[in-house]
Amino acid sequence: MNSRLINWFKFSSPATFYPLAGRLVPWFGGAAAVLIAVGLYMSFFVAPTDYKQGEGYRIIFVHVPSAWMSMFIYVVMAVWSGLGLVFNTRLSAMMANALAPTGAMFTFVALWTGAFWGKPMWGAWWVWDARLTSELILLFLYIGFMALQGAIDDPRRADRAGAILALVGVVNIPIIYYSVTWWNTLHQGASVSVTKGSSMGVIMLVTMLIMAFGFWAYSIAVALSRVRSVILERERDTTWVAELAEVRR
Amino acid sequence: MLEVADLECVRGDRRLISELSFTLSPGELLHLHGHNGSGKTTLMRAICGLIRPTAGKVFWNGEDSRKLGEDFSRDLIFVGHKDGIKADLNGVENLRVACALDGVSIDEKQAWDALERLGLRGHEDLPTRVLSQGQKRRVSLARLLVHRAPLWILDEPFTALDKAAVDYLQTVIKNHVEKGGMVILTTHQEVSLTRGHKKQLRLGWKGEGDV
Amino acid sequence: MFEAFLTIVRRDLILAIRRRSDIFSTLFFFVIVVSLFPLGIGPELNTLRLIAPGVVWVAALLASMLALERLFSADHDDGTLEQMLLAPQPLFILVLGKVTAHWLVTGVPLVLIAPLLGIQYDLSTQALQMLLVTLLLGTPALSLIGAIGAALTIGVRGGGVLVSLLVLPLYIPVLIFGAGAVEADVSGLGAQGHLSLLGAILILALLLAPLATSAALRVSAE
């Protein structure tokens, strides 16, 4: 066994991960604050006004990165769930647990900003566009995951049941997305396209990426601090938790 | 031979069993003792494979029972708290379904016979819904008479049974052990079981292990 | 192995026949839901003809979801589920048996009565036939996918509502292709593509859902 492998498994123990996560949270939190501040500044003041869509289009700098994050977090959650099922590590399930609310929040933000963007563009708060509909279904999947976890009392069973659901969901997401797209084109419904219609300038792309990285850092910071409280709650009877400075206080 | 190695089970927040090891050889009976909530049922379910232990393994004839999977379950009968019978099926149907699932095919005659030996004469073709608690228990225990699995894991098999049935079941268990079978059982009733190879295990006290 | 499959199917069918009211309650739920829409929307036949496939399919989704609650919970309560987990048979075969029986008891009646409900909506014979075919392909997939949700929520408080949260989003592709096939057929676009995709979903569900259900059952039995 090489030393790297040992290192990985070392951090899969909650007792070693807890302080590490504690050290990482401020860094990612700070990075998130800076990146999002810069990203917002750029999206409001630096990015040029779109000649077709006016000022209203600026909401896509929030909308698109959160839509990216919402999908990506679900995949990460499923990966953690799979790892937890295969290696039977407690921390993996806790990570999946901690990611779900953040993912649901980004899904909700994507839907909300999509509606705000749709009103001036299409004259309706909600259009049954393929992407928005898939995003809505993704929100349902997140809610189902959290509801299942919340309803099961035994944390070990909750973890594993949630993991199975996350894996079933991740297999289904492409099918759902494909079927919704098919349904949408067949009915010739409205197509809300973000990138088409207005040529995406370099500045716009950079702004969007900065926002995306900001959201990334935010998700990591929030998930890590949430996983820390999950660890504390689950491991409250162990000696290492009792010896923690912040617990003894 | 059954070997339990360093078993640890956690239920909810409580570590019920930790570092438990014992072996059970053919012709031996293991009587589990312990107060309510000491982990007897958990231990039995963990040995069966219904519960995944947090640490440790169960070996059957030297091989990991989890890896053996169906080959292990073929050698095992588990009678739990729940009778495992369908209320809308009658005794014979229940017994035949249970045996078919276990891969043992028995005909109607054998099923009637087993139920009759357990004192259910005249009740074999009633839906078990209308039977008393003790009679349901007997239907569920009838599997022991037709099955040839060497390892029996019986969780409180004597509950709800009357004196005659308890006596009969004791003879069945005794015969099984004498023929080289293995039995793990819990009971709160004072029962005289086989004299020969009987092991006792106490759970819930400081020093765990054979007594 | 096949023996065990048949045993489970036979057992569950006998049980269903002895408790016929369960079959009928699902069926009448389906009939009532479909009959409510004209009351809410108005009796205009042109509108009704347009929404009929969607309405029938949504009602089928809800009906098959309602029936899921009984799929494993009774077996869990009386301990037969435990015995199934310990039986020396591959668990997914037993799950497949349970789902088959469940579909025969709850899915097939829906398929059979759907044309009758289609007539209420003035569907053409061609559309009725297509509706029948899509339901025949789609309802087994619903039972298979639903079994995962049913297995995950065994013995969980508020299991019935929870199952709908878990399962309905997963049903969406079946709904889209099922209802879409009828519409496409009526509008002359041809339903071949829809039907193939529905078949593909069924095959995929047949391969993967019993495995996920087995894993979920093992987790829930602890």
Image (tube, rainbow, N blue to C red):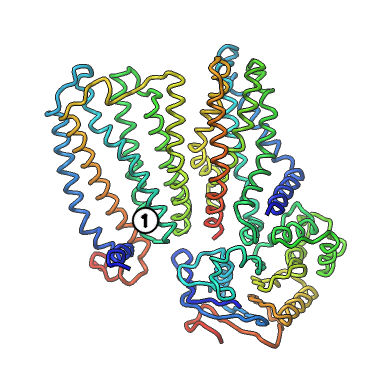
* Quadrant into which the C terminus of chain C falls: bottom right
**Does the rendering let one see residue A182?**
yes
Residue reaching furthest to the front: A2
The answer to whether residue C9 is above or below residue C85 is: above
Count of marks placed on residues = 1
> Could you say which is closer to the camera, residue C115 or residue C126?
C126
> Could you say which is closer to the camera, residue B155 or residue A183?
A183
Q: Is residue A237 left or right of residue B165?
A: left
Label 1 marks a residue whose chain is A
Q: Is residue A1 left or right of residue C221?
A: left
Residue drawn at 15 percent across, 27 percent down: A47
* Quadrant into which the N terminus of chain C falls: bottom right
* Crowd tier of the residue under label 1, counting other residues whose Cα lies within 10 Å: few below 14, some 14–19, many 20 or above: many
For badge 1, the amino acid type reads Met
**Does the rendering let one see residue C153?**
no
The answer to whether residue A129 is above or below residue B123 is: above
Query: Residue B84 location, x and y as percent?
Result: 68, 60
Q: Is residue B144 left or right of residue C168?
A: right
The answer to whether residue B198 is above or below residue C222 is: below
Q: Is residue C58 left or right of residue A81?
A: right
Query: Residue B142 location, x and y as percent?
Result: 76, 66
Residue drawn at 29 percent across, 19 percent down: A121
Q: On the image, which quarter does residue C41 sit in?
A: top right
Query: Residue A183 location, x and y as percent?
Result: 46, 25
Residue reaching furthest to the right: B122
Q: Which residue is mark 1?
A: A94
Query: Residue B69 location, x and y as percent?
Result: 58, 64
Mark 1 falls on what kind of element?
helix
Residue drawn at 30 percent across, 40 percent down: A69
> Could you say which is closer to the camera, residue B129 or residue A166?
A166
Q: On the image, which quarter does residue B139 sit in?
A: bottom right
